[in-house]
Amino acid sequence: MRALRAISTLSMRLGWAAIVWVILAQGCARSAPPPYIRVQADAPRLEEAPRARAHLVVFWAAWCPPCVTEAPSLRDLARRPPDGVAVVTYSHDQRLGDAERHLGSPADPGLHLRLDEGHVQAERFGVDALPASFLVVGDQVVARFNGPRDWNSAAMRRLLERLVREASEPDLRGR
């Protein structure tokens, strides 16, 4: 009888310990970073880009359903970008007004919205589908994001901050 009671008490304690561990482990877990392609290439020149340590260059169009899907989170990120990051948005629309219908009319100033006439910038960046985005730090492209994103999510903000920080650190290998 005594042994049965001891086993019962032990199993209750282990059960509570397991529950507490699961709750604490979930509270500490962070979501995985959003998918991206790491790049190390010279960046094309950004005409009239705002002064910033890094630029998130977004290629976008109002006629592109995935682009329209990401528009609210892109606007939110542009309003409150991570430290040192400026958003530059190139529209593939015929008129700026088409893009502004989805990005705000007039477009939020933080988006630095402009037409990519003749898709000149898209060609320079190697854009083959929309939406496509690139993180440029200094004069280097360090990441490519294909497809729509939740730009203002905590995981995306952490990723952008980390990529900017890593690209801004001096190369410790002496190169």
Image (cartoon, grey):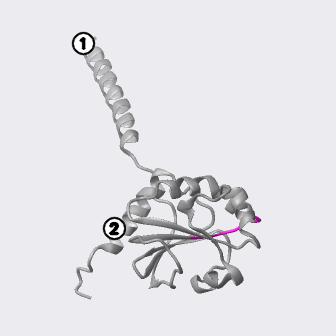
How much space separates mark 2 and mark 1, taking CA atoms?
Answer: 61 Å
Quadrant in which the C terminus is drawn: bottom left
Q: Residue at x 47, y 66 (%)?
A: 86
Horizontal and vertical percent for residue 22?
38, 36
Viewer-side residue, 166 vs 17: 166
Residue 32 visible (yes or no): no
* 19 horizontally vs 93: left or right: left
Quadrant of the rendered structure where residue 174 is? bottom left
Q: Is residue 124 left or right of residue 3?
A: right
The label number, if any, that marks residue 165 in the structure image: 2
Identify the residue at horizontal 64%, vertical 57% (top origin): 71
- In terms of sequence position, does the residue under pointer 2 or pointer 1 come before the other? 1
Residue 43 to residue 80: above or below? below
Instruction: Spot the residue most to the bottom.
Output: 175
Expressed as whole percent of the image width and height from the top left, the position of residue 134 reads 52, 73
The stretch drawn in magenta includes residue 59: yes
Q: Residues within 10 Å of mark 2 (few under 14, many from 20)?
A: few
Quarter assignment of residue 142: bottom left
In this picture, which residue range is highlighted in magenta?
A: 58-63
Foreground residue, 75 or 49?
Answer: 49
In x, y percent, where is residue 124?
59, 86
Tag nearer the camera, 2 or 1: 2
Instruction: From the viewer's perspective, tell me whether residue 167 is left or right of residue 106.
Output: left
Circle 1: element type: helix
Residue type at numbered disc 1: Arg
Identify the residue under disc 1.
Answer: 2
Name the element at disc 2. Answer: helix
Tell me residue 141's x, y (percent).
46, 79
Residue 11 visible in the current orientation = yes
Location of the N terminus (image quadrant): top left
Q: Which residue sits at x=26%, y=78%?
A: 170
Q: Based on the picture, tell me whether residue 1 belongs to the magenta stretch.
A: no
